Image: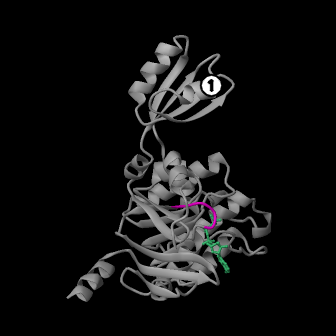
Amino acid sequence: MRKNVADEVSAGAAVHLAGLRKHYGEVRAVDGVDLTIAPGEVVALLGPNGAGKSTTVDMLLGLSTPDSGTVTVFGRSPADAVADGAIGAMLQGATLLDDATVAEMIAMVGSLHRNAMPAGEVLRRCGLTELAGRRGSKLSGGQKQRVRFAIALVSDPDLLVLDEPTAAMDVGARREFWRSMREYTDTGRTVLFATHYLEEAEEFADRVVFLRSGRIVADGTVATVRALAGGRTVRAVVPGAGEPELLALPGVTAVDLRADRATLSSDDSDRTLRALLSRYGHAYDIEVAAAGLEDAFLSLTTETEPAR
Ligand SMILES: Nc1ncnc2c1ncn2[C@@H]1O[C@H](COP(=O)(O)OP(=O)(O)OP(=O)(O)O)[C@@H](O)[C@H]1O
């Protein structure tokens, strides 16, 4: 009975990881990850360096074998899902051909798939039409990323897996990249992307999953995870104030003081603000904000290591 329920969950899911583990000697790169992603979800995988993001992605794509646990993608093994073009992947530093043009590379990958998108359509979606005749060796780092994205899209996959897709892109290229991604996800496709840019997760993901030391430490909507950081931030310019006095204000849990600009973390921003104004009536440029994903990230990643 229980097995049937588990089978149903994994069959209906886009991605189902159960009890996933991968150790390298003493290093527990992935240490018991359970994760189910529904079709159509856009999920950001966050975590500090070495948290196990790439190792998880590699197992999801069938590029490495778990020590224990299972991976299914649309109810199939990763190898089967990749073989029939259901998964498109964009990996960090994946090699491109120096001597082939962008159009040739797209055509080559397209020839491997039964239902490949027309090359012209892929080039358009990825903003590569102008670069179609450019050879691999002549592309900038950001342009190479766009070609990797195009290669991931060629099979018109149901699931896109992206490992730090916008690394090496400038601000304009990142914006353009996410525009193309929206075009893809608007059609109900599933995306899992690992990133270090919290604002990308905040803006783009339906759900964020935080990994630390090979384990999931938070999983939910951006709003839920942000709330884990709790509290609010009170910012103000407070001429003449010192750090110890600010820290002594009611509700304040941390102070960052640069020149006269103070950033106060507070678990009771109303009391903090009242006390701040009564003590420093000359304070100005005052702002109160909910803690952001970045605060959640910091508090989740700087807590003491989990006991093993
Ligand atoms: N092939 C390997 N051999 C030995 N250790 C490895 C190997 N691959 C990864 N590791 C270790 O496993 C841990 C997880 O690495 P992983 O690359 O999955 O982290 P990550 O979250 O992707 O990090 P980053 O944000 O830096 O890309 C790290 O401690 C890493 O050094």
Determine the image quadrant of residue 101: bottom right
Residue 67 at x, y = what percent? 53, 88
Above or below, 256 against 110 in this view is above
Q: Is 47 colored magenta in this rendering?
A: yes
Residue in the image at 42% along x and 37% along y: 267
Residue in the image at 39% along x and 26% along y: 270
Determine the image quadrant of residue 98: bottom right
The image shows a total of numbered marks equal to 1
Question: Along the line of sight, which residue is nearer the eye, 241 or 157?
Answer: 241
The amino acid beneath tag 1 is: Arg
Residue in the image at 63% along x and 46% along y: 172
Ligand 1 in which quarter = bottom right
Disc 1: which residue = 261
Q: Magenta part of the protein: which range?
A: 46-50
Above or below, 278 against 109 in this view is above
Question: Along the line of sight, which residue is nearer the eye, 54 or 241?
Answer: 241
Whether residue 119 is visible, yes or no, is no
Above or below, 260 against 224 in this view is above
Category of crowding for the residue at label 1, using alpha-carbon neighbours closer than 10 angstroms: few (below 14), some (14–19), many (at least 20):
some
The chief SS type of the magenta part is loop
